[in-house]
C-alpha cells in the first residue's frame, strides 16, 4: 500500500572609508569596556533560602528564578522521572487545576515554568503579588495528578519514537554513554522501558527530597528594590520548610587510554553523524575557562573556525561542523561534530583530528585571535540584553563562588588573552589520542573505514553493546527470492492475488487530538487517501488510474511528473505483486540491522527511476520497513515507515501497527479496521 508523506515547507557599503583602511594590518583594539550588571543584594531566610536581588528599573518587570543547587541525580531504571516531577508541579495544586493555573498566569500576562531544577516566574511589577502567590502555590502545594503523568509519559514515548530515526539524537545518546558510562547520571538515557517504570510516587519522592529551601537560591531581577523584595520573599517563601538532601557522589570519569570508535548501524543512512568527544576537568569559574573558550572558538565555534573552514569550505564534506568545550562542576567535556556523506566519513574524521593536532602544535594567528575575541565579546554583549542573563550571572557568582567582579571584568579578561595562552589551553585540553569517535551511519559501507582510527565497538541506539552485524548474504540468494518469501509469508502469491480492493483505517494522535488516516485501494491501480483530525479534513489524495489530485486543507498541492509516474506503484494493494508483474528492477543490497532484527534490504527502482528500499525479516520473511530518500530544503532526508503486528484478513496477512513519518516527527498508528474485497466502486476514485 502507498506510503504517507507529509512535507512542510517553510549590505551596507561605506565607500569613502574603504580607500583609507590598510587591510593588511589588524586594527588595534580599544580598551575593553567595564560591564555594569548592578550590585546584587543578598540575604538568607531562616529556612535556608538564599536570595539575590538585582535592581534594574529599565522596564516595569520583575523575574523570580528559583534554582535548586545540585548538579545531577542518579535515576537508574526510572530515568526521566526527575524531569517529569518538575513538569508535573505546574499541572495542579490543592487549590487549582492546570487550566486554572494557566488562566491565572495569562490573566496577569505572566510566565510560570517549572522543572526538575527549579521554578521561573515573570510579570509586570504591579502584578508581583499575584505572581508570587501563584508561584508559591505551585511550589508548596503540588498534587501530581495521575492523568497528567500519563499525558507526560505518552508525550515522552512519542518523542522517543521520533528520536529513534534521528541520527543526531542517536549520536547524542551514544556519546553520553561512552563518555560517562551508564553508572553516571550524565550517561543515563530515558528509554521506553524507563518511562514505563515511572510512577507518581517516584515524582512525589523527588519533590519531597530535592525541593528544599536548604539547597535553593532565589534570584530576583527587575523593577524592585531590595527592601520590597525582602518583604515579599518573607511573606511568600518564609513558610517553606524542608531538610537538606544528602547529595550522592558519582563515579569518576576518565578519558580512554587510546582512541575508541563507537559505531551505530543505521541501515538507511546516506550520511554519517560524527562526534569526537572526551571528558575534561574544567570547573565553572576556573581560571582557564575564558582562555579555553577562546581557544575552542578558533578551533570550532562559528563559521570562521578552523574545523568549519576545513570540512565545509576547503573539502566540501558538509554544510556544518564545529566543536564545543564545556565546563561543569562534576565533569566537563570536549566534543567535535559534523554530518557528512557516507563515502567521506573517514576523510572527515581524519580532518577533524588534523585540526586537533594542528592547534596544539602551531600557534594561532593574530587575526584568528582577534576574530575569536570579537565573536566571544559579541555573544556576551547580546546576552546582556536579557534581564535573565543578569539573574544567571548573580546566581553563578553565588553558586560557584566566583569573584564578585567576575562578569564586570569579563570582557577585560577576554581582551587580555594572548596567543601563548591559546596554545597552552590547546595543549592542556585538546586530547586527540584519548578520544571517543562516535559514528551513526550505514555500517555495511562505513565500518571498514573506521578500523584505522582505533578499536571499533558496535552499539544500538541506546548505547548498549551489540555484536557486529553479519552482512554476508546466503550464497545464491536473489531479490526475487526475497520478494517471493514475503508473498509466501503473508499467505502465498495465489491468495494475495485474490485481493481486489482494500480499505484501511488507521488512527493515531497528534497534539492531543485524534488523527484518522483512511486509505482505499482497488486493483489494478486506483487509490484514495484521506487524513482528518477531529473530524476535520486535512488532506486528500486521489489517483483514478490516470490522473492524480492532492489537496491540503482544501488547497490544491502541485504534483510533479515523477510523482505521477510512480502513482501506479504507490497505489498497488501489494507492492511486491506490482514489482513482479511490471518487472521493476530490484537489487538485494545486503543484510541490515533494524533495531536488533536482521533484515534483507531490497532496493526497488520505481517507474520514475527513483529508488525505494524494502526491508524483510530474515527469519519470517515479513516486510518490516519501507524507506525512501527525498531531497528537501534541509538537504537529503530519509522517510521510513515501519510495519509490524501482521494479522490475517480473509487469508492474507496485513500489518496492523505502523510508525509513520510526519515531517521530522514519527507517529505510532494502529489499524482500526482492515477490510478486503468489499466491492469498492470505481466512483470512489472519481476526480472532481
Image: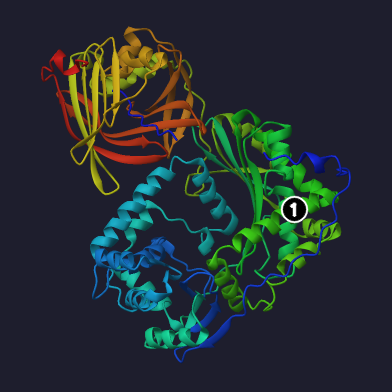
User: Which of the two residues, 234 or 360, is positioned nearer the viewer here?
Assistant: 234
Picture quadrant of residue 121: bottom left
- For the rendered model, the colour scheme is rainbow
Residue, x 33% and y 16% (percent of image)? 567
Residue, x 63% and y 32% (percent of image)? 448
The image position of residue 558, as x and y in percent, is: 37, 21
The image position of residue 223, as x and y in percent, is: 49, 76
Residue, x 55% and y 30% (percent of image)? 444
The image position of residue 169, as x and y in percent, is: 49, 46
Classify mark 1: residues with Cα within 10 Å, few (<14), some (14-19) or many (20+).
Answer: many
User: Which of the two residues, 634 or 33, is positioned nearer the viewer here?
Assistant: 33
- Give the answer, above or below, for where 589 lies relative to 224: above
Which part of the image, by quadrant, shows the N terminus?
A: top left
Q: Hey, which residue is sitting farthest top in the picture?
A: 582
Read off the residue under disc 1. Answer: 372
- Give the answer, above or below, for where 478 lies relative to 19: above
Horizontal side, residue 273 vs residue 288: left or right: left
Which part of the image, by quadrant, shows the C terminus?
A: top left
Horizontal side, residue 54 vs residue 520: left or right: right
Horizontal side, residue 364 vs residue 440: left or right: right
Horizontal side, residue 34 vs residue 619: left or right: right
Residue 194 can be seen, yes or no: yes
- Give the answer, above or below, for where 174 lies relative to 96: above
User: Which of the two residues, 74 or 504, is positioned nearer the viewer here?
Assistant: 504
Residue, x 47% and y 49% (percent of image)? 462
Q: Hey, which residue is sitting farthest bottom in the picture?
A: 46
Q: Hey, which residue is sitting farthest left in the picture?
A: 679
- Give the answer, above or below, for where 654 lies relative to 228: above
Residue 433 can be seen, yes or no: no
SS for tag 1?
helix
Q: How many marks?
A: 1
Amino acid at each position: 500500500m502507498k506510503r504517507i508523506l507529509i512535507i512542510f515547507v517553510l549590505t551596507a557599503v561605506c565607500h569613502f572609508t574603504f580607500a583609507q583602511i590598510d587591510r593588511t594590518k589588524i586594527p588595534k583594539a580599544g580598551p575593553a569596556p567595564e560591564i555594569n550588571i548592578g550590585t546584587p543584594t543578598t540575604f538568607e531566610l531562616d529556612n535556608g533560602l538564599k536570595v539575590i536581588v538585582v535592581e534594574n528599573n529599565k522596564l516595569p518587570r520583575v523575574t523570580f528564578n528559583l534554582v535548586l543547587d545540585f548538579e545531577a541525580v542518579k535515576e537508574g531504571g526510572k530515568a526521566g522521572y526527575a524531569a517529569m516531577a518538575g513538569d508535573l508541579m505546574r499541572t495542579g495544586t490543592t487549590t487549582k487545576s492546570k487550566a486554572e493555573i494557566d488562566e491565572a498566569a495569562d490573566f496577569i500576562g505572566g510566565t510560570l515554568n517549572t522543572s526538575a531544577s527549579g521554578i521561573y516566574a515573570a510579570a509586570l511589577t504591579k502584578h508581583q503579588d499575584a505572581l508570587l502567590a501563584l508561584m508559591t502555590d505551585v511550589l508548596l502545594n503540588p498534587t501530581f495528578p495521575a492523568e497528567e503523568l500519563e499525558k507526560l509519559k505518552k508525550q515522552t514515548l512519542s518523542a522517543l519514537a521520533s528520536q529513534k530515526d534521528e541520527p543526531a539524537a542517536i549520536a547524542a545518546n551514544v556519546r553520553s554513554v561512552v563518555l560517562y558510562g551508564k553508572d553516571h547520571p550524565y550517561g543515563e538515557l530515558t528509554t521506553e522501558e524507563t518511562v514505563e517504570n515511572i510512577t507518581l510516587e517516584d515524582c512525589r519522592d523527588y519533590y519531597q527530597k530535592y525541593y528544599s529551601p536548604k539547597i535553593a537560591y532565589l534570584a530576583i531581577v527587575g523593577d524592585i528594590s531590595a527592601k520590597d523584595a525582602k518583604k515579599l520573599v518573607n511573606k511568600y517563601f518564609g513558610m517553606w520548610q524542608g531538610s537538606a538532601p544528602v547529595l550522592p557522589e558519582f563515579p569518576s570519569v576518565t578519558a580512554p587510554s587510546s582512541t575508541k570508535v563507537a559505531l551505530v548501524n543505521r541501515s538507511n543512512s546516506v550520511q554519517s553523524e560524527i562526534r569526537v568527544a572526551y571528558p575534561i576537568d574544567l570547573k565553572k569559574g576556573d581560571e582557564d575557562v575564558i582562555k579555553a573558550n577562546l581557544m575552542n572558538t578558533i578551533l570550532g565555534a562559528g563559521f570562521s573556525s578552523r574545523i568549519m573552514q576545513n570540512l565545509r569550505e576547503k573539502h566540501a564534506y558538509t554544510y556544518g561542523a564545529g566543536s564545543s568545550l564545556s565546563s561543569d562542576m562534576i565533569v566537563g567535556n570536549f566534543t567535535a561534530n559534523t554530518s557528512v556523506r557516507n563515502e567521506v566519513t573517514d576523510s572527515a574524521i581524519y580532518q577533524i583530528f588534523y585540526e586537533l593536532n594542528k592547534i596544539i602544535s602551531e600557534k594561532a594567528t593574530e587575526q584568528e585571535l582577534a576574530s575569536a575575541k570579537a565573536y566571544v565579546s559579541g555573544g556576551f554583549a547580546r546576552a546582556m540584553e536579557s534581564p535573565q542573563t543578569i539573574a544567571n550571572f548573580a546566581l553563578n557568582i553565588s553558586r560557584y563562588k566566583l569573584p564578585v567582579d567576575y562578569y564586570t571584568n569579563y570582557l577585560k579578561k577576554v581582551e587580555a588573552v594572548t596567543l601563548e595562552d591559546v596554545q597552552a589551553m590547546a595543549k592542556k585540553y585538546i586530547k586527540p589520542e584519548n578520544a571517543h569517535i562516535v559514528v551513526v551511519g550505514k555500517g555495511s559501507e562505513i565500518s571498514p573505514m573506521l578500523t584505522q582510527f582505533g578499536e571499533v565497538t558496535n552499539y544500538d541506539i541506546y548505547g548498549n553493546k551489540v555484536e557486529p552485524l553479519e552482512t554476508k548474504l546466503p550464497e545464491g540468494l536473489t531479490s526475487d527470492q526475497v520478494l517471493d518469501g514475503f508473498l509466501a509469508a503473508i499467505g502465498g502469491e495465489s491468495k494475495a492475488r485474490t485481493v481486489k480492493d482494500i480499505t484501511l483505517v488507521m488512527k493515531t494522535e497528534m497534539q492531543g487530538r485524534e488523527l484518522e488516516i483512511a486509505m482505499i485501494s482497488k486493483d489494478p491501480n486506483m487509490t484514495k487517501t484521506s487524513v482528518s483530525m477531529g473530524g476535520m479534513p486535512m488532506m486528500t489524495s486521489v489517483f483514478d488510474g490516470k490522473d492524480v489530485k492532492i489537496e491540503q486543507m482544501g488547497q490544491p498541492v502541485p504534483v510533479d511528473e515523477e510523482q505521477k509516474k510512480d502513482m501506479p506503484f504507490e497505489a498497488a494493494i501489494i507492492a511486491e505483486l506490482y514489482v513482479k508483474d511490471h518487472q521493476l528492477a530490484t537489487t538485494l543490497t545486503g543484510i541490515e540491522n533494524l533495531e536488533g532484527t536482521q533484515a534483507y534490504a531490497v532496493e526497488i527502482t520505481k517507474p520514475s527511476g527513483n529508488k525505494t528500499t524494502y526491508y524483510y525479516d530474515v527469519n519470517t520473511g515479513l516486510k518490516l520497513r519501507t524507506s525512501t530518500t527525498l531531497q528537501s530544503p534541509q538537504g537529503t532526508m530519509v522517510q521510513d515507515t515501519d510495519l509490524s503486528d501482521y494479522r490475517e484478513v480473509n487469508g492474507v496477512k496485513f500489518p496492523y501497527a505502523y510508525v509513520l513519518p510526519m515531517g521530522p516527527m514519527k507517529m505510532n498508528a494502529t489499524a482500526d479496521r482492515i477490510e478486503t474485497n468489499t466491492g469498492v466502486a470505481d466512483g470512489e476514485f472519481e476526480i472532481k
